Image (cartoon, rainbow, N blue to C red):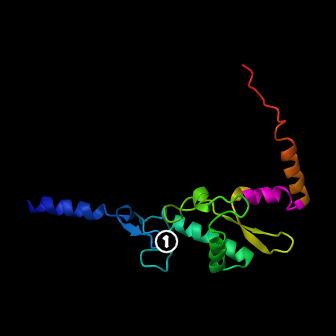
């Protein structure tokens, strides 16, 4: 009887591997298996993994990269967002509606820092679509005025295409 219990205990110990060990991300507080699938390796830590999960680390790195490129601090970025009431300066949509609430899920697409390509000066924070639109018009106000004129002139005269059966 004692040998059966001992063998069961040995099997339990042998089957313990990294898949049975869990780790809590110190950023998002989610619990994941302590594996390289969920955490980056960090040999300076006791368990061999970063304290943040890969998703939190990616989100942080995206924001840190933006701050570095535009020479602004995270505090300045958050201040700009607050001054804009968390909305795109062009279309006025709420960033939480577009990208989701950062407290509920990870941000894969984040608001864009708009800047003048000639001077490098930061102008504000825009949604992805508005930022792309400005770039598509080469940041040229004359082209934007022509686009507005075009839309107004052709508002009622658009040809409706019908699918042929």
Residue 131 % position (x, y):
75, 60
Does the magenta portion include 131?
yes
Does the magenta portion include 18?
no
| Residue positioned 65% across, 75% down in the render | 77
Which residues are drawn in magenta? Answer: 130-141
Q: Secondary structure at mark 1?
A: strand
Query: Where 86 sits versus 163, above or below?
Result: below
Query: Where 24 sits versus 73, above or below?
Result: above
Residue 65 sits in which quadrant? bottom right
Q: Which residue is mark 1?
A: 52
Q: Main secondary structure of the magenta part?
A: helix
Residue 71 % position (x, y):
73, 79
Q: Is residue 89 left or right of residue 134?
A: left
Is 112 or 123 nearer to us in this picture? 123
Q: Is residue 51 left or right of residue 120?
A: left
Q: Residues within 10 Å of mark 1 (few under 14, many from 20)?
A: many
| Residue positioned 25% across, 62% down in the render | 12
Residue 143 % position (x, y):
89, 56
Residue 134 % position (x, y):
80, 59
């Amino acid at each position: 009887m004692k040998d059966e219990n001992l063998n069961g205990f040995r099997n339990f110990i042998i089957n313990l591997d990294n898949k049975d060990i869990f780790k809590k991300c110190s950023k998002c507080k989610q619990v994941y298996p302590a594996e390289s699938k969920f955490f980056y390796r960090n040999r300076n830590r006791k368990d061999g993994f970063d304290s943040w999960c890969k998703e939190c680390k990616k989100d942080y790195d995206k924001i840190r990269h933006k701050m570095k490129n535009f020479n602004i601090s995270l505090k300045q970025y958050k201040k700009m967002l607050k001054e804009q009431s968390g909305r795109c300066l062009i279309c006025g949509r709420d960033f939480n509606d577009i990208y989701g609430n950062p407290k509920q899920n990870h941000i894969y697409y984040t608001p864009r820092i708009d800047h003048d390509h000639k001077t490098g000066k930061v102008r504000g924070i825009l949604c992805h679509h508005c930022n792309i639109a400005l770039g598509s018009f080469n940041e040229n106000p004359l082209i934007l005025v022509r686009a507005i004129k075009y839309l107004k002139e052709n508002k009622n005269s658009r040809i409706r295409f019908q699918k042929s059966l």
